[in-house]
Structures are given as C-alpha cells and as structure tokens.
Image: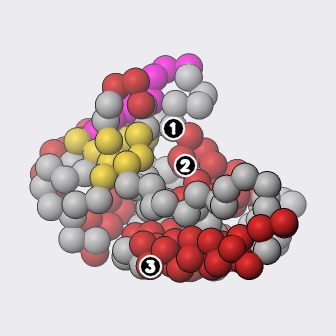
Amino acid sequence: MWSRKVVGWAVHDIQSDDHAAALIEATCRREKVSANQLVLHSDNGAAMKGKTMLVKLEQLGVMPSFSRPRVSDDNPFPEALFRTLKYRPGYPDGPFITIDDARRWVAGFVSWYNDDHRHSGIRFVTPNQRHDGRHIAILAHRDHVYRCARERRPDRWVGGTRDWTPILTVRLNPEHGLDQQTT
C-alpha cells in the first residue's frame, strides 16, 4: 500500500485459499517481510478467508484485515489498481485465449505499472522508485527545478509551485489512525 508496488501476483484457472497462501508465502520471502511487520487487507472472498490462507498468515506473522461487508470502497488502493489494469491499452475485449496468455499480459502490466507508471497518488513517481527510496531524490530535484523556473519567470506562475514533498504516511482508514510509514 505504501509504495503502490505490486509485490506479488499469480494467475490460476481457479481461485483458492491454497493458491493465495502460496502467493503470500512466496511474496513475503522474496520481499523479506519479517513476522509482525505486515497487515494484509483484503476483501471477504473465500480464498482470503479460507483455513489454509489464515493458517499461512499466522505462520508468517501477517495480520489479516478484511473489508467491511457490503462496503464497496473499503479497499481503495487495489480497486484503483484494478481500474488502471482494466483501462490499460491492450487489455482484451474478451477473455484470454489461454492461461499463459493471461499470465504474459499480467506480467507485462505489472512491469509497466511498477517501473514506468508515474502514480498520481505518490507524487508522480513510479511504485518501484518509491519502494526502494529513490523518490526522495527525485522529488527534491523536481522541487528544485520548479523553484528555479518560478524564479526565472515569475510572470508565468500564479501562487506557489507544485508540492513535491514526499508523502511519508499513508492511511487506509485515517479515522482509525492505522499508518503505513517508512522505517
């Protein structure tokens, strides 16, 4: 959530808690997620609430969190990702011909999303730039460029420059104070 990076994904012919558990385990290992470091917020689907998945989360020290029933916008970050995916050029009008076609398309999308897509919610840096900390220098450089441009041609500016301050705290439910911060 903090960086918007897609850290794990899989395409299967069926949805199951076994597949979900295998994906979260592989992702936690690859991303070196320590026990009690991660909260996994998801919908109330059977795959996410199945026994295999819940046992795996407990083994990994991942705290499950679920959307409120019948609240369609309770998980806005993945919903925004899915909208970006569905409206990406090249998204098929109909079903994929094979599961391998679907996997290839998703792999290409995830690569574009993580490495090339400048996300408006994180000050127009890519998810990978934010995830690995490069966003700090990028945003400082942008701020410098904007300030210099404003000094050279103040007549072209109304008000201040764009805010390039890094966003250090992200809240899923601001009213509850549950933060995702840099450490």
Give the mark nearer the N terminus: 3 vs 2.
2
Residue 78 numbered mark, or none: 2
Q: Can residue 65 be found in the magenta stretch?
A: yes
Q: Is residue 95 left or right of residue 21?
A: right
In the image, which residues are magenta?
64-70
Using a 10 Å C-alpha cutoff, classify the residue at mark 1 as few (fewer than 14 neighbours), some (14 to 19) or many (20 or more): some
Q: Can residue 78 be found in the magenta stretch?
A: no
Q: Are marks 2 and 1 in contact (CB under 8 Å)?
A: yes
Where does residue 12 sit, x and y in percent of width and height? 52, 62
The amino acid sitting under disc 2 is Pro
Where does residue 183 sit, x and y in percent of width and height? 22, 60
Of residues 159 and 94, the one nearer the viewer is 159
Q: CA distance from mark 3 to mark 2?
A: 27 Å
Name the residue: 55% across, 63% down.
164
Residue 137 numbered mark, or none: 3
Q: Are marks 1 and 3 in contact (CB under 8 Å)?
A: no
